[in-house]
Amino acid sequence: METMTSQLEETKKAEKEYTGSEILLRSLIEEGVEVIFGYPGGAVLPIYDSLYEGHVKHLLARHEQGAIHAADGYARATGKPGVVIATSGPGATNLVTGIATAMMDSVPLVCITGNVPQNLIGTDAFQEADITGITMPITKHNYLVRDVRDLPRIVKEAFTIATQGRPGPVLIDIPKDVSNAKATFHYPESVYIRGFQPNTDPHPLQVQKLHEAIAKAQRPVILAGGGVVSSGAADELVKLAETAQIPVTTTLMGIGGFPGTHPLWMGMPGMHGTYAANHALLECDLLIGIGARFDDRVTMGRIDKFATKAKIAHIDIDPAEIGKNVETFIPLVGDVKKVLEAVNENVPRSQSDDWIKQVDEWRRNFPLTYKPSADTLKPQWVIQHLHDSTGGDAIVTTDVGQHQMWVAQYYRFVRARSFLSSGGLGTMGFGFPAAIGAQLAYPDRTVIAVTGDGGFQMTAQELAVVALENIPVKVAVINNHCLGMVRQWQEVFYEERYSEVDLSGSPDFVKLAEAYGVKGWRAKTQEEAVRVWEEALRHPGPAVVDFWVTPDENVYPMVAPGAGLDEMLMGDEEN
Ligand SMILES: Cc1ncc(C[n+]2csc(CCOP(=O)(O)OP(=O)(O)O)c2C)c(N)n1
């Protein structure tokens, strides 16, 4: 007996021990992590010391918000979880906007923060912030690691939770003493998480109900959201729309989930939606929401005026979404791709011949319009030109504001995971760093960050990163010299009382780019725009193009807040 015990002890001794930070990195490697975005500091010194070995690529952002949006852009472009590291206190709180951005748009992220040693937690120690408390409502789940031996399991759980079911951000907070403590390393192959068993397969009875509703429908509409993109169901959606002959509208998050060139596509619905999409929602008799959450940018919060003639079917991975905003007649809980595969087996054709003619007529009679002019630059024209020059096949990220809506309206995306934009939180400053993440994932694709002159200034410091790493992102600044979307609301709803929207004092963006060692161009006319954009696209490295557009252009159509989809402002008479 004694010999056996000592043998066991010998084996234990022989097994190598690693520090918490080494265990963390080994776990990330086990998860197949290719790149970490981050920023160091005191509480993550042990982690950065382990990174020194260079086993995992790390990209040093210039602000933690830049790091997390880059991780988010990487995740949106690839479908793989993005990973970000920040130090305790201000490093961790600088992640908050990025975490909320990812949460609102269901993006899988694993966010790692350092914290002060456990004996100092709760003492208002230097750079202490209760980041698990702060991020509780904006993470899918979060952890404070108390024992180094728990670390591999926690990392495995974090990746599982971030990616399974409805994706979302997970935070792991690691006190410094845990990063320094030692343990042996065994990475679990899988984990069982009680209370987290997402249902991915549809109920056959519900599929049958949807078939019956489609067969009877005379005016069916598909409202496709971000769930189509994140579950990789774009092909299945095309098949459903074509077989059942149902016109499709894609929400901001659903853009690219259905080809923008398809004859059954009606464009985006809602506040800045097309006439055809909004009128189809008003008149339809069957509305099939697919991976869309019926949010107020689509329904305008006026459920009493939204799809009132329709029976609503709702396909979603998250049961909490069913019935949250609209009354649902046929709920179908499951992974969108799996549900659509099941629905596509024997899906009947709807009775939509006259309806499709009607939708086509709306599309013909009320297209998106603006008045182009050769000697000035119209922002809509610039976006159309970005589209035409890339064949609609670039990855385009945006900030938030008018330019974002114009990209959604005028860039016809043909592929999923190509339009990356902060839809739910509406985060200015998202676009440029997100483009960095997307470009790292796809070095050979054209990646364009379309930003406003306001939004670009929120994260422009990341120019250092694209310069240093020669990441060939093309930044297209739609420069209207003001906070355009706010100016538009003040014009339309506040009697032109323009309050704090003038961006005078902004830097010369060409010189700003050059100060970082990035090539910059400016265009003020169509002719200049064509020439410099071509040069920027041909340039092998990063580029900033400052498009000076007409400052008083508005995004139309527009539905005023509080109005129903039937009350669309179509824009200037001349348009
Ligand atoms: C972080 C953040 N702060 C404030 C806002 C409110 N907001 C929405 S659009 C907008 C104006 C954006 O201006 P700009 O970046 O120049 O883009 P434009 O609308 O002119 O295209 C503002 C301030 C926001 N969405 N995000």
Image: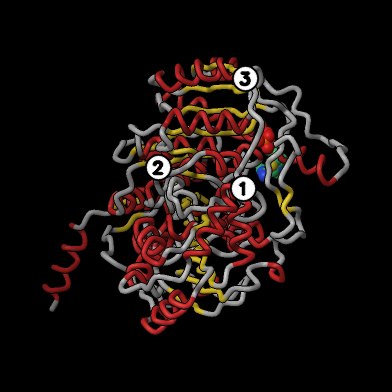
Image quarter in which the C terminus is found = top right
On whether ligand 1 comes within 8 Å of the CB at mark 1, the answer is no
Q: Of circles 3 and 2, which is in front?
A: 3
**What secondary structure is found at the residue carrying circle 3?**
loop
Residue 295: % across, % down: 62, 62
Q: Is residue 563 left or right of residue 18?
A: right
Q: Is residue 560 left or right of residue 345?
A: right
Which residue is at the front of the view, 164 or 260? 260
Give the residue number, with chain letter if any, for mark 1: 365
Residue 320: % across, % down: 54, 73
The Cα atoms of the two marked residues, 3 and 1, are separated by 25 Å
- Mark linked to residue 310: none
| Residue found 49% across the figure and 77% down from its top | 331
The Cα atoms of the two marked residues, 3 and 2, are separated by 45 Å
- Mark linked to residue 374: 3
Is residue 515 among what the camera can see? no
Q: Is residue 208 left or right of residue 479?
A: left
Residue 245: % across, % down: 42, 63
Q: Which numbered disc flags the more N-terminal residue, 3 or 2?
A: 2
Q: Which numbered disc flags the more N-terminal residue, 3 or 1?
A: 1
Which residue is at the front of the view, 146 or 499? 499
| Residue found 86% across the figure and 44% down from its top | 494
- Mark linked to residue 36: 2
